Image (tube, grey):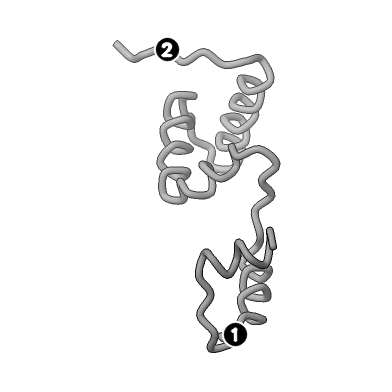
Amino acid sequence: MVPTIEMDDESKSLLEEIQTEIKSETGGNVTQQEVLAHIVECVYESKADIIDSFQDGYVPLSEEEREAFHSGMFSSGVETDEEDIDEILYG
């Protein structure tokens, strides 16, 4: 017996839409269970992204934005420790 997964009406509707599009594009029938299993497999491959998406207010950066951010980084040659940071922040 296959376990039952409960979902809201909107998610169910989206799942049905995906199922319909797969049938339309491929000509083959696919069950909602097969669609969900495939979605889980695909998401599992990039699970860091899905985990991050659940963080409050998180907006992921594109790869281009990440590269731009890191391209401006350089080493000043000065090592900073916690005491230095505390002194700068709190005086």
Is residue 59 shown above or below 23? below
Label 1 or label 2, whichever comes before in sequence order: 2
Local crowd size for mark 1, using a 10 Å CA cut-off: few (<14), some (14–19), many (≥20): few
Q: CA distance from mark 1 to mark 2?
A: 53 Å
The residue sitting at 68% across, 68% down in the picture is: 65
| Quarter in which the N terminus is drawn | top left
Q: Secondary structure under badge 1?
A: loop
Residue 24 in which image quadrant: top right
Q: Which residue is mark 1?
A: 74
Relative image position of residue 26 (x, y in whole percent): 53, 42
Relative image position of residue 63 (x, y in whole percent): 61, 67
The residue sitting at 41% across, 32% down in the picture is: 37
Residue 74 in which image quadrant: bottom right
Q: Amino acid at mark 1?
A: Phe
The residue sitting at 51% across, 80% down in the picture is: 79
The residue sitting at 49% across, 35% down in the picture is: 28
Q: Which residue is mark 2?
A: 4
Q: Secondary structure under badge 2?
A: loop
Viewer-side residue, 79 vs 83: 83
Viewer-side residue, 58 vs 16: 58
Q: Amino acid at mark 2?
A: Thr
Relative image position of residue 91 (x, y in whole percent): 69, 63
Image side of residue 70 versus residue 29, left or right: right
Viewer-side residue, 84 vs 48: 84
Relative image position of residue 45 (x, y in whole percent): 41, 50
Image side of residue 5 versus residue 72, left or right: left
